[in-house]
Image (cartoon, coloured by chain):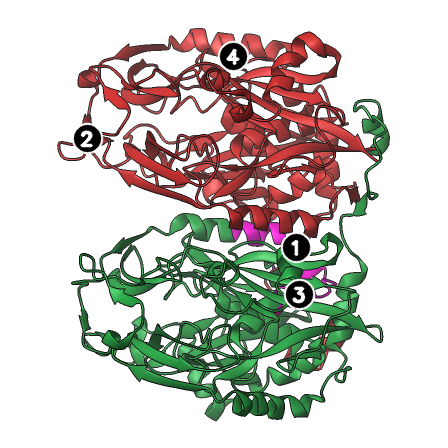
Chain colours: A green, B red
Amino acid sequence: MTARTAAVFLDDGTAPDRGLRPRHDIDLPHRIALSAATRQGVGPHTEDVRAWLDERRRSHRFKVERIPFARLDNWSFDEGTGNLGHDSGRFFTVEGLRVVTSEGPHQEWHQPIIKQPEVGILGILAKEFDGVLHFLMQAKMEPGNPNLVQLSPTVQATRSNYTKVHKGGAVKYLEHFTHPDPDGIVADVLQSEHGSWFFRKSNRNMIVETSEEIPPDDDFCWLTLGQIGELLHADNVVNMDSRTVLSCAPYPDDQPGALHSDTELLSWFTVERSRHDIHSELLPLAGLPGWNRSESSIDHAEGLYFSVVAVRVQAESREVAGWTQPLFAPRGTGITAFLVRRFGGVPHVLVHARVEGGFLDTVELGPTVQCTPAVHAHLPSMDRPPFLDYVLDAPRSTPSRIRYEAVHSEEGGRFLKAESRYFIIEADEASAPLVPPSGYRWVTPEQLTSLVRHNHYVNVQARTLLACLNASGIRG
Amino acid sequence: MTARTAAVFLDDGTAPDRGLRPRHDIDLPHRIALSAATRQGVGPHTEDVRAWLDERRRSHRFKVERIPFARLDNWSFDEGTGNLGHDSGRFFTVEGLRVVTSEGPHQEWHQPIIKQPEVGILGILAKEFDGVLHFLMQAKMEPGNPNLVQLSPTVQATRSNYTKVHKGGAVKYLEHFTHPDPDGIVADVLQSEHGSWFFRKSNRNMIVETSEEIPPDDDFCWLTLGQIGELLHADNVVNMDSRTVLSCAPYPDDQPGALHSDTELLSWFTVERSRHDIHSELLPLAGLPGWNRSESSIDHAEGLYFSVVAVRVQAESREVAGWTQPLFAPRGTGITAFLVRRFGGVPHVLVHARVEGGFLDTVELGPTVQCTPAVHAHLPSMDRPPFLDYVLDAPRSTPSRIRYEAVHSEEGGRFLKAESRYFIIEADEASAPLVPPSGYRWVTPEQLTSLVRHNHYVNVQARTLLACLNASGIRG
């Protein structure tokens, strides 16, 4: 095309201060794949990482306790709306939400929801050692984590963090993400958080490579993707923020075939976004139908879904020495699963175009199954989520088909022990047909990887499963 | 990867009812390019198209007249909110909007806005004749078009259209878009409409290729992209819906270099989406600050921006024989321009990450200049839009740099004579530097073409300019 356009556009001879860049970094996917294939790096042995996390936990003497709302510092219920917020107006608020939709067993509901309009940064710093990419992972305490300390991104920063509303210490390594080397950006994309608990919340998911010397720190270590992949097989080791950032890594896209072309997949997604009528509106938390507030929790009248609670946190490693905050505490352990099949020799996962009340735009692609079984136990079988029974039965009836299983918790800064059992399970025509129900579609992991370069295609639970597929050695 | 995964996933032998598909159609971009290079097809000669539009206009005896609001049929102002809506609750409503943002000369404003939550279909049917793709274009009347009849997509259908709220005739050729051949989908993506006039409005932009026999119709003709490109040089011939659909055509992406890699461009876009604080909320139209309602219009107190008016339409070719409706009538002709430069021999256009109050998600990429000069005439020069003066002066001071110039009107079903003068103008380091102001970035047409495959990256005005770049022979 250069030749054709040469006659048309002026070239005024201005030399760019750096040359033109290749639009696509052809080496990067192979470097990602090499890191994923490397099970020992320059940092700790994989089998020592959990002991290191235990050691960090002990050395910081963390303590988290439930408290009544009245003992929250600087958090209070607004007199008019009953919304729960911080006196500074920052961080987040807990408000009411009403959702009306046109499908499913529940076509209208009310619920508390977290509103946090600012965009945070979840960032992992990468650096090559001995020719292999390593990722700087942090031993970080979050009060809602079942075991408090998990393997976290280099940086988890809300805008309040880096504009210093905390009045605490600076966030370590933050400058690599607020002022990245343009040639070092591996991934940088806005992704949604839980649409059932957050109102239109997005975070920047960033991976940035550096060639600078990075000063060591007791709370950080360098791991290869292969090591992190192994750790993803353990319960509650790799935190949610790490999982979602890792899902955005540009793994090789070397599989040219699929049941549906990329254009056909995008068309199906467009139909799914268009066909759902969903209306969500924020309401005052006070008087929200079906929810009751007591001294120390806000609960659903039938004891379902989740409660809003408050905790006091004491710790020494955090940006501030201690604090209090509200958390959402889900009832019961969730089930999150991809069913997988090969068609024509090519692996596919079954995604579900999910409506969640807090999504910015109607639907995102979720796992085949994403639910809390306890919530659905009372429903007639036709209203139970498709494929749930297959997943629940798999440990007994088809254990050899379970390719991946681990318990992970969701963001411990907002959710108290919000655990889900994540599965990747093989299926067959009888359990998951080639032509799936409306709203479901078979896609390849490569197609999902191409979609997570962009905003709001893949929800946070499916991103965890994609990270497991890509990094845990299941795919290759 | 097949070899690597073969050991892991079951292949249960189920034969897909059709084979695996290539994820990317390698021939299609070349077929698009061939059509763009073809200036005579099986349909009318290009120079006869305008006469054909004139003939259709005359044969249907269209008549559009302004009326007072009181003479609208089945449209009325709600007694409580003052919102203007249809008695059926369908079509659209005119409501109030309050926008608060953190930048620019106006940090808070109120305005009427069109709320139309349903997703419509804008679709162009494609078919190969003599080895060249042709596109089925319609001579369609829209009451707001300055010349009433323009060249329109095969189908423009609101959901009201195809669920028959109109109670009129069926939309011709609609079934090709509601039930497309999966292998014939050329493009299918949700794109935003005008963020200054619509509240979070998206339409499906579809191009679908068929091999079926298509019955001829007096209001339709087959044109090549090259013919449509020539017609894009004429004022008010190719309507907005055609322009936005055509911008989504997958032109060849054969330019591997750019000032910024695709990943860096996406990262910059992520920063722009993250850094803007914008809060938009719908309000009752009644009592909207700064706006006054009279018998036949709603106007800004200082006579700026636009008015809301009502029209009566009489026509015979439309799905229904006659109707009344509100329209937005902008004040003054807009200016919409891309500045273009070559760097290292590669053409780039200067995009602007624009905040518009009605966007679903803070910013989209807009033209270098997009404004109504009359609105800014009273502002001090530092508050005037960057690059506006260069564009306004170009016809006098640098006419040889104007690569493209034509007047186009926006969607004639909602906007009354909403004309903008569209420009593509060469620039140099003095007029548009390599390092542009914050919020602006040089990108290649190929990069924009890759972004319009996805939702909400490129705004409707920039899509018109992209269609002109791609189809009108300017790029190549």
Disc 3 element: loop
Give the spatial CA distance, label 3 vs label 1: 20 Å
Kindly identify the amino acid type of the residue bearing the numbered disc 4: Leu
Would residue B181 be counted in the magenta stretch?
A: no
Tell me where the magenta segment starts and ends, as one range.
Answer: A246-268
Give the spatial CA distance, label 4 vs label 1: 54 Å
Residue at image mark 1: A179
Q: Give me the chain letter of mark 2.
A: B
Q: In the rendering, which numbered label is found on residue B82?
A: 2
Q: Residues within 10 Å of mark 3 (few under 14, many from 20)?
A: many
* Label located before the other in sequence (3 or 1): 1
Query: In the image, residue A377 lies at what x, y percent?
Result: 29, 81
Q: Residues within 10 Å of mark 4 (few under 14, many from 20)?
A: many
Q: Does any portion of residue A391 appear in the rendered image?
A: yes
Query: In the image, residue B29 lies at what x, y percent?
Result: 72, 40
Q: Residues within 10 Å of mark 2 (few under 14, many from 20)?
A: some
* In this view, the mark in front (4 or 1): 1
Give the spatial CA distance, label 3 vs label 2: 50 Å
Residue occupying the point 42% across, 47% down: A274
Disc 4 element: helix
Q: Give me the chain letter of mark 4.
A: B
Residue occupying the point 62% across, 53% down: A262
Q: Is residue B337 left or right of residue B329?
A: right
Query: In the image, residue A417 lies at what x, y percent?
Result: 40, 82
Residue at image mark 4: B53
Q: Does any portion of residue A474 appear in the rendered image?
A: no
On the same chain: label 1 and label 2?
no
On the same chain: label 3 and label 2?
no
Q: Quadrant of the N terminus of chain A?
A: top right
A127, A339: nearer the viewer? A127
